[in-house]
Amino acid sequence: MEKVPQAGYPIEGLEIAGFNRSNIFKNIMLPFKLLKSLRQARNILRRFQPDAVVGVGGYASFPILRKAQKMGIPTLIQEQNSYAGKSNKILGRKANVICVGYEGMESFFPADKILYTGNPVRGSITQSAVTKDEAMRHFGLMMGKPTVFAVGGSLGAKSINEALLPHLADFVNKDIQLIWQTGKLYYETAKSAAAPYATHVKVFDFINVMDFAYKAADTLISRAGALAIAEICVAAKPVIFVPYPFAAEDHQTKNAESLVHKNAALLIPDARRAPGWPTKH
C-alpha cells in the first residue's frame, strides 16, 4: 500500500487477512472479512471492466480472482514459489493459464494449464550497466576487499539482524566489508551498534538501488522469497539462504532447496540462528 503508489500506480485495498496458523481464535472474523472483500472485489471489477485479471498468490489476490472467475473474466495466476499456496491451488482449478517459476508444479495444478515462465525480475537489475567501482563508491566501500550483502527483504529479517549484531567486530578483524539492509524496525539498533565499525559496516534501512548492492557484493545472506531468488540468480552471486520459517507451507525453505540441490546455494535453517524460536526444520 506504500510502495505501489510511490511507483506511480493507483492501488485499492481489500479488507481481507490471511489464516492465522499460530492462534486459531484470531480467525473468528475471517469469514466476514472474506465476504466483505468479495463484495469489494465485485465492485472493483464492475467499475474497471478488465479484459483479464492476473493474480500472484496469497490471500490478498484471492477475492479478486475468485470473483473474476465467477463473473466469467479470464484469469491468469503467476505462482512464484516452488510450493503452491492454498489460494493458488483453489484458484488454479478455474484459471485459464498458470505461469510458474519452478519445474515440477504439476503436483499442484492441471498440467495443461501450466506455462513455465520463470519469475519476473526488474529491468533495473536485468539491464543494469553499473560497474563494480561505481557500486563500491556508492556505498562508501573500498575496492579489493571481500564484501558481504545481508538482506532480509524490504522489512528486514529479525533473526538475520540478530545473528549479525554480535559479529560486527569480526568483519573489521577479518577485513571484510558488510552492506547491511536491516529494515526500518531494526535500523536504529543496527546503526548504533555499527558506529564503531563504520569503515567496514554500512547500514541501511532500505536499499532502492539493488543492482548496485548486487554488483558490490561478493556473496549474499538472504531470505528465500521467490523474487529475491530470481534476482540473485540474475546477479549470479553465491548466497547463503536463511528461509523465513513461518512462510505459508514453509515455501521459502522449498524455494531455497531448489537451488541447494543444484549446488547453487547454501541453506542455514532460521532455527540455528535464533534458538529461542519455534523449530520448523
Image (spheres, rainbow, N blue to C red):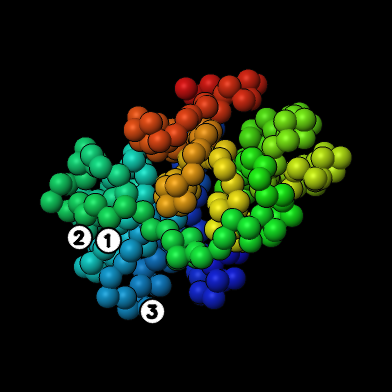
In this view, the residue in front, 264 or 84, is: 264
Residue 70 left/right relative to 280: left
In the image, residue 61 sits, relative to residue 28, either above or below, namely below
Q: Residue at x 38, y 58 (%)?
A: 120
Mark 1 touches mark 2? (CB < 8 Å): yes
Q: Mark 3, residues whose alpha carbon is within 10 Å: few (<14), some, or many (≥20)?
A: few
Which residue is outermost to the front? 144
* Mark nearer the N terminus (1 vs 2): 1
What's the mark number on residue 76? Answer: 1
Residue 110 left/right relative to 71: left
Nearest to viewer (mark 3 / mark 1): 1
Residue type at the position of mark 2? Asn
Which residue is outermost to the right? 196
In this view, the residue in front, 96 or 224, is: 224
Q: Residue at x 62, y 25 (%)?
A: 273
Residue type at the position of mark 1? Leu
What's the mark number on residue 47? Answer: 3
Q: Secondary structure at mark 2?
A: loop
- x then y, percent, for residue 163: 68, 30
* Mark nearer the N terminus (3 vs 1): 3
What's the mark number on residue 96? Answer: 2
Q: Quadrant of residue 275?
A: top right
- x then y, percent, for residue 38: 39, 61
Residue 252 left/right relative to 192: left
Q: CA distance from mark 1 to mark 2?
A: 6 Å
Q: Residue at x 56, y 40 (%)?
A: 219
Q: Quadrant of the N terminus?
A: bottom right
Q: Secondary structure at mark 3?
A: helix
Q: CA distance from mark 3 to mark 1?
A: 20 Å
What's the mark number on residue 159? Answer: none
